[in-house]
Image: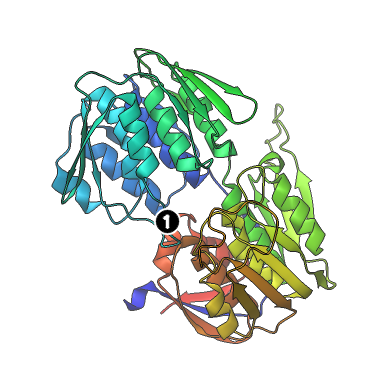
Amino acid sequence: MTDDVLTVHGGTPLRGQIRVRGAKNLVSKAMVAALLGESPSRLYDVPRIRDVEVVSGLLELHGVKVSAGADDGELVMDPTNVEEASTDEINVHAGSSRIPILFCGPLLHRVGRAFIPDLGGCHIGPRPIDFHIQALREFGAIVDKAPEGMHLSAPNGLHGTKLELPYPSVGATEQVLLTAVRADGVTELRNAAIEPEIIDLICVLQKMGAIITVHTDRVIEIQGVPRLHGYQHKPIPDRIEAASWAAAALATKGEIEVLGARQADMMTFLNVFRSIGGEFEITDARVARPGVTGVEGGIKFWHPGHELQAVALETDVHPGFMTDWQQPLVVALTQARGLSIMHETVYEQRLGYTQALNQMGATIQVYRDCLGGTPCRFGRRNFKHSAVIAGPSKLHAADLEIPDLRAGFSHLIAALAAEGTSRVYGVDLINRGYEDFEGKLGALGALVERL
């Protein structure tokens, strides 16, 4: 489709100010949590992205009334009349998101049945749902497999249990939290994910009346309660989008102030950004006084004006270097002097986007070996998951096809940094996680246009 193509005239430094809203990886899960309440919930600072539309549609299929609030970015969800949805209607959304599996616990509590369609999402490697299914069974769910998906029921209700994750998976941790809060008894989850978005989801659930304790050593204890009510919540800012714009500033030799970005969520990224040679300045929000408008805080990122330095990096679960940060940053690393190393330990097929960068003049070699010491989920399993980036490389324009969300934004950054005019196909996929990215590019002085 020609209207899904962006023409990018590269070589212009990005300069200006943009704002990030609530984190994509929290907002969608907080929307699912609204199903658990017996009164309306209000979520603020919600980004206008495709994932929010998908979850809104799924909620409405199940009888939740979803509407815009009085403020810009406010979403109101009324779960008073939750009901079972048809498998055909749910399957319409199956290729759009992996969120449907997180509906299971809340729906089993509210209506006694749930359905899991074939799951979509970005193609960055298999993300098996085995643990999700096993955990739901441990809670007492009965799972029946069918050609169109899986049907779940809980004729005897759901009950607290003891679980240990083989890997601190974010999705599996969310599944346990959303199921355990209304299960009968106490649930103990070991080796849980503790990402900022997980802690923020726990804050949402606590506001609803849940009793959740986060212990040391990745142990979370949930004491089930018989009922929950609605919440009012402003989510943490999107640290992935903030880092993506930071990488764009570095790659294009520009300066971008990201309003809403928060230091506490990005400390690991900021350390790496500084190690490469990038500069940043943190501005804390100033409280409004009578007659004075409040000033929102954020982080300003800019290229130092001198050569960037190569680094060796490994992605890891929080508080390590986030896997979603590596793709945009690798584009910037093509401009650093020396050999940089990126060892991807979370998703086995997340380096496919480097082929397009090589097509544009980068020098990136991918390897099956683990080029680092961080424990890897798939070492010795024949996946090319380590990359060596030689720089600096002069990037030139190319025609690019976007394969997934984060790689898509990385391709866009590369086109902006390259000399000449590139055509980027499939850019609507970026709308899954980046609100109004074309408007923000315009505000930063980028020369882009739809074909």
Q: Position of residue 438 (x, y in %)?
A: 50, 65
Identify the residue position indicated by label 1 in the image.
Answer: 432
Pointer 1 local density, CA inside 10 Å: few below 14, some 14–19, many at least 20: many
Q: Is residue 420 left or right of residue 373?
A: left
Q: Position of residue 23 (x, y in %)?
A: 52, 44
Q: Is residue 47 above or below residue 43?
A: below
**At 53% across and 57% down in the image, what residue appears?**
378
Q: Amino acid at mark 1?
A: Arg
Q: Is residue 345 above or below residue 204?
A: below
**At 63% across and 43% down in the image, what residue appears?**
318
Q: Position of residue 37 (x, y in %)?
A: 35, 22
Q: Quadrant of the N terminus?
A: bottom left
**At 58% across and 78% down in the image, what residue appears?**
357
Q: Is residue 210 above or below residue 392?
A: above
**At 43% across and 50% down in the image, what residue appears?**
48
Q: Position of residue 315 (x, y in %)?
A: 63, 55
